[in-house]
Image (cartoon, helix red, strand yellow):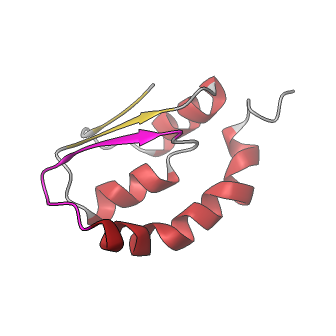
Amino acid sequence: MSIWASGAAYEPYVGRWSRLVAREFLAWLDVPADSRWLDVGCGTGALSATILAVARPATVAGIDASDGYVAYARKQIRDRRAVFR
């Protein structure tokens, strides 16, 4: 199995670190509420989930080259404002 195929395998290594810094990163960006976000290289959706939780976005579009990561993000994040491809 390719390392790029399993969101469950990726999440404990990279996703957990993304979650630790995401809130500070979003505060630093200071993007207005109701903005449309594009999360390029979204992986398993760690940053997208934090955007949805704290940034009050209109929409979040996450894109990633890994079908496995996209599938994981779709399964974990059920917010109607989010789409993953």
Identify whether 6 is placed above or below 37: above
In the picture, measured across the screen, residue 60 lies left or right of residue 69, that is left
Work out whether 56 lies above or below 38.
Answer: below
Q: Quadrant of residue 25?
A: bottom left
| Residue 30, quarter of the rendered image | bottom left
Quadrant in which the N terminus appears: top right
Q: Quadrant of residue 20?
A: bottom right
Q: Which residues are magenta?
A: 30-41
Q: Locate the C terminus by quadrant.
A: top left
Residue 16 percent coordinates (x, y): 63, 63
Left or right relative to 85: residue 3: right
The answer to if 36 sits in the magenta stretch is yes
The residue under the point 31% across, 55% down is 52
Q: Residue shown at 63%/28% (left/top)?
A: 66
Asked whether 37 falls inside the magenta stretch, the response is: yes
Q: Residue most toward the front?
A: 29
Residue occupying image coordinates x 62% and y 56%:
15
Pinpoint residue 3: horizontal percent, then vertical percent.
81, 35
Indicate whether 50 appears above or below 35.
below
